[in-house]
Image: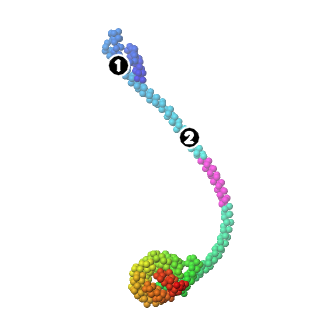
Amino acid sequence: MRRSVRLGSGLFGIVSASWIGFPAIDMQPVPSQPVSLALVSSTQQPLQRLPEVSQKDLQQELQMRKLVQEEVDRAFNHTTALLNVLLAILTVLPIIATVLLYLSRQRAIQELREEMDEQIQKEIEAQVQAELKQQTLIIQKQMLELGQESFAVTRQVQQQASEFQAEIDQLKTEFETQLEALKNTATEVEREKDRIFQQITSITLVATSKDVLSDEKKRQIETLTEQLDHLKSKSSGLDLDINNFVREGDALFFAGRYLEAINAYDQAIGKTIVDTSNLFAAWHGKTKSLRRLKRYPQALAASTKAMALKPDDSLMWFERGYLLHLQGQYSEALEIYDRVILDQPSFYRARNHRGYVLLKLQRHEEGIIELNKGIDIKPDYGNGYYGKAYYYLLQNQLDLALDNLKLAIACYPKYKNHAKTDPDFANLWGNPRFQELVGLPVVLE
């Protein structure tokens, strides 16, 4: 490109030089830097041929040519820049035209779409209005038909409501009659319940302190518990309070139904407690029932609950001492019996049991003294004679032992069966007189 520019510049210079009056010079394309040397060498020959041209004129011509060359370069560069700008414009114009054409097309499409949407919307609205109008007419017709049907249904419903009201009135009357009958039945059940518990209470409260009943009282208790069972089966909703459960437990205890008694006591314990006296009675009864079942550790735990409610109750302390006694903890039992007797010197059961424990601890003389004290207080208490029979057996006085055993059985026939299995009386099991006392076949040796 640079070479072409220079070539053009030289040609334009020759033309310009001939136009301003200089002779034409044959110019060869040479590099721009050694212009002056080439020019000097080329002018040396004309100087030889044209001796009339001066050195000064030559320098002016060279200077003029240089100016012309610079002007030509400047003009050409300016022209080239304009051409480049024009070329860029000519290149961009089609792109701009294309973009403008695309935008115009999109705008036209958008306007056409909007017109179509508007037209479609109008058509849809017109169609919807027509359909709504038609549906409105149909609905009005249906409503008219429904109005007629509803009128008929209303009349039918009113008639059914009247019939239903009559049935309700009849059922109400029957319900009130049944309710009145139930109230009367409930009243009768409550009266029967109160009667049973009053009789149970009158029997058990007297016997609680000694845990024994006469045969007649025991039969009465058995009858009362059967009546209570029947009443409960007949009226599942029978309401029993804590006192009722305690009395029921006592009745079942004296009837020998110890597991059922424990269940009744547990129901009493599970009630919301206000009066702790009934709660104490429930724990006390549960303790005795567990003792009768020989579940001594559980009985001791129950006695602890009872004593927490009444720490100074002598009967409960006696019960705890008896549990230790039955488990062979004689020293611990003796301490408790001592405490009970200290509080109640006339407590004959504690004295009789204390005498028996002293015999177990081999304090025989102290034991017989305590047993006699208990018999003096309560001569018809068989436990004292039973203890004395054991004392005389330890002394190897068999006749006295059998005499006292006979007195014990006379007071409490239960000692017949007890003596048959009591290891304390094992030495008498083979004695004919003993066998006769306890009802065993007499085996003669």
Report x, y in % for residue 417: 52, 83
Segment tinted magenta in the rendering: 121-144
State the mark number for residue 109: 2
Name which residue lies at 47% across and 88% down. Answer: 399
Question: Quadrant of the rendered structure where residue 133 is?
Answer: bottom right
User: Alpha-carbon neighbours of circle 1 within 10 Å: few (<14), some, or many (≥20)?
Assistant: few
Magenta stretch, main secondary structure class: helix
Q: Which residue is mark 1?
A: 34
Q: Which residue is more in the foreground, 203 or 93?
A: 203
Name which residue lies at 32% across and 16% down. Answer: 59
Q: Which residue is more in the foreground, 155 or 167?
A: 167
Report x, y in % for residue 224: 55, 83
Name which residue lies at 66% across and 62% down. Answer: 146
Sequence-wise, which precedes: disc 2 or disc 1?
1
Q: Which residue is more in the foreground, 380 or 399?
A: 399
Q: Quick one: SS at disc 2?
A: helix
**Left or right: where 143 falls relative to 43:** right
User: Alpha-carbon neighbours of circle 2 within 10 Å: few (<14), some, or many (≥20)?
Assistant: few
- Nearer the observer: mark 2 or 1; the answer is 1
Mark 2 and mark 1: span between their CA atoms?
Answer: 68 Å
Considering the image in quadrants, where does the N terminus appear?
A: top left
Name which residue lies at 46% across and 75% down. Answer: 298
Q: Which residue is more in the foreground, 431 or 238?
A: 431
